[in-house]
Image (cartoon, grey):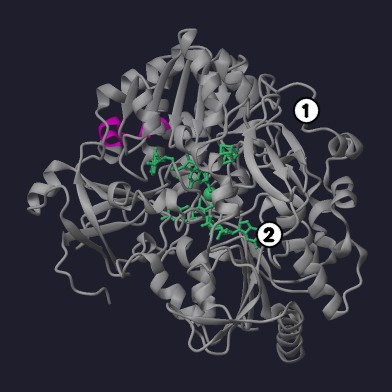
Amino acid sequence: MSQTVQVVCPHDCPDSCLMEVTVEHDRAVSIKASKEHPFTRGALCAKVNKFLDRVYAPDRLLYPVKRVGPKGPGAQFVRISWDEAVSTIVEKMQTTMATHGPQSILPYSYRGNNGVYQSNGIDRRFFHALGASTLARTICAGGLLGAMDYSDVFFGFAPEGLVESKLIIFWASNPLNTGFHVWPFVRQAQRRGARLIAIDPYRSRTARACDEHIAVRPGTDAALALAMMKIIEAEGLADLDYVQQHTIGSEPFFSRLHSLSLPDLAQTCDVPVTTIQDLARTYATTRPAAIRTGVGIQRNGGGAAAVRAVACLPALTGAWREAGGGLCNFGGAMFTAQNLKGAMRFDLSPEGTREINMMRLAEHLLDPSFDPPINVLHVYNCNLAASLPDQAELRRGLQRADLFTVVHDLFLTDSADYADIVLPATSPLEQDDMVLAYGGDFGSFSRKALEPLGEAKSNADVFQLLATGLGITEPAVHASAEAFTAEALRDDLSATDFLSRPFMPTRPEPDLLPRAQGGFLTPSGKFEFFCEKMERDGLDPLPAFVPPHETLSEGPFPLNFLPRKHKDSLNSSYGHLPVMRRQESTARTLEIHPRDAAARGLDTGDEVRVFNDRGAFVLPVVVSERVQAGTVATFWGWWDKLSGGKGNVNNVTSTQLTDVGGGGTFYDCRVEVERWDGQALA
Ligand SMILES: Nc1nc2c(c(=O)[nH]1)N[C@H]1C(S)=C(S)[C@@H](COP(=O)(O)OP(=O)(O)OC[C@H]3O[C@@H](n4cnc5c(=O)[nH]c(N)nc54)[C@H](O)[C@@H]3O)O[C@H]1N2
Ligand SMILES: Nc1nc2c(c(=O)[nH]1)N[C@H]1C(S)=C(S)[C@@H](COP(=O)(O)OP(=O)(O)OC[C@H]3O[C@@H](n4cnc5c(=O)[nH]c(N)nc54)[C@H](O)[C@@H]3O)O[C@H]1N2
Ligand code: SF4
Ligand SMILES: [Mo]
């Protein structure tokens, strides 16, 4: 007997595709893309076409295990029962609560699964009811969301509007790899005469598909944006009517622009003045003009300032006036369809509970004065021993002998090696979930297609079991996926519709003109070139270039390092699967400019040690002009434990934070490269 079930792709990707899973005798035999879904439109990406390889991978963890022997690489585990797993975790939680209070327990997760019920709902309710420390989930978009506190930089026009654009600037955004379902809209615009420009230090797949690629120096986008605005204002290309009606602070802002030197800005961002002039004129005079930002722009010490500076452009030119003009952000639909309070029930968390920035985990684990200490760490939806920066420091923290760590995952990841207990997680085919896309205005109820493989359990199952063990009877924690959906949707959306339809639009029509009449999400309701709140918080109230931590610095490590996202993996989630293992020799390489290669006597194929004062890893180089001189790039996502001792890219990245928002600075990193002498890494 065969049946088809609709399951939503769980990945941290803006598209939230709808998959049609055919099941025969409780085994999924095929996955197809929905043709009706407005974004999926009959195509899944390369990774998810092979999703069944992930579901049925021979290394799926199918029962709970506990570690025997030391923590860290090579850790050994033995099978235990769920009863033993749950009672051990409950006992550890109770013990630390008795001595240090519940805040000595820390949940640790990101978006390994993007679902709301399983991964951004029941989990939060459980930890809030427990009184655990809360986690600021900053790793991906901390800088962007930090800038959002001061300027309306996040929500743009719906991606469907790109069809109308005559100019589309991909500013630190590589959708051909990272969310390719906007591309059909872009292609349509191109057929109607749109010009495409990419601003990216690396010649990405998207940059190659554009008419023009501007290779900015990493971490200096604010300088480029300010230079463009200086030209636009000086040449009378600003829309002064829009500025007057819908913005505040233009006078001090223009004075600021007058005080800046164009040659200095050009030198900072390493783009010739003439190129910036052409870009500024093209941007201000082509209408409608869209800017699509990705996350690359805010992965540096001045990341929030860069996001804010770029967001000033459409306010200055009035690009918001036309459909297809303004910002069209990567995560622009995030949170808009959710009743966040209803989903997460912040009210269950005791007043005064501390919030811990996830980027500072290692520092806090290692700080003897951190009070209360973190004694129980519950990791789910996150492979921190691959994805966090400065792995040496992190691993020292995870090694702490008195730290009890639970890892809940589908696989024995690098992180699992630091766990006391590892719990087997279900795949999205084996659980119900409520999923809202963050790249478009739609959501779906993802249906369970299979019984859990082995003894796997979903996140909600685990938190409900732990709640029962700990005597937490709060009904919100024990809600079913259906009941939860009704509480977690924005009030005007119907849960009955959501549950009964394959997918549901979360707006009647895509919003193509969100700021044509102003209505910015700021205290004044206008776009704030001058932001009083920033001034009150001791920040520069005007758009400014805030220097990155490392990419402009002089010192022993002369090369900028870009550890970028791979087409066939989702962060580290495919790193151990055949699709990625097969590419280790071809894609797991360091691209280096001919000039930098020559200076070090390197040729394509030579193995190099990439290092700085935080750590090192080894891989072969490819001499390539896709990077500029002074920058090296690679893809990330492979697992350290499968690297044959050659290490992880995040051995060299830094835990320094963005200027605002406490975000990660993965692309603000300096390294040196030398021929590898075959010595083991320290
Ligand atoms: N296939 C695949 N898809 C994914 C993911 C994946 O791992 N693989 N990850 C998902 C996640 S978690 C996210 S957050 C999104 C991210 O989606 P994107 O934002 O598109 O991803 P990135 O590749 O991090 O960054 C985009 C581009 O920014 C460039 N960049 C780096 N530094 C700078 C800079 O200082 N200035 C400028 N102008 N450009 C810079 C990079 O070279 C890169 O080409 O993708 C999601 N989709
Ligand atoms: N060098 C470098 N580092 C980066 C980045 C980069 O571009 N370069 N990108 C950064 C960004 S943008 C992000 S968002 C982070 C992402 O970093 P992570 O959040 O660590 O993402 P993944 O590496 O995909 O790991 C997610 C884990 O969740 C597990 N998982 C999936 N579904 C479930 C589930 O339902 N339940 C449970 N319990 N587990 C599940 C997966 O098997 C996987 O092991 O990485 C950051 N790190
Ligand atoms: S494009 Fe994104 S949402 Fe669609 S199948 Fe691929 S990872 Fe999943
Ligand atoms: Mo991310």
Camera-side residue of 571 and 361: 571
Q: Which of 34 and 519 is in front in this view?
A: 34
What residue range appears in magenta?
257-266
Query: Which SS class for mark 2?
Result: loop
- Whether residue 316 is visible, yes or no, is no
> Under tag 1, what secondary structure?
loop
Q: In this view, does 232 lie above or below 467?
A: above
For image coordinates 68% across by 25% down, the residue present is 38
Separation (CA) of disc 2 from disc 1:
31 Å
> Cβ(mark 2) to ligand 2 < 8 Å?
yes
Please tell me how crowded label 1 is: few (under 14), some (14-19), or many (20+) other residues with Cα within 10 Å.
some
**Is 473 situated above or below 342?**
below
> Which marked residue is nearer to the observer: mark 2 or mark 1?
2
**324 with respect to 555 (left or right):** right
> Quadrant where the C terminus lies?
bottom left
Q: Mark 2 points at which residue?
A: 426
> Label 1 belongs to which residue?
507
Residues packed near mark 2 inside 10 Å, few (<14), some (14 to 19) or many (20 plus) = many
Q: What residue type is labelled 1?
A: Arg
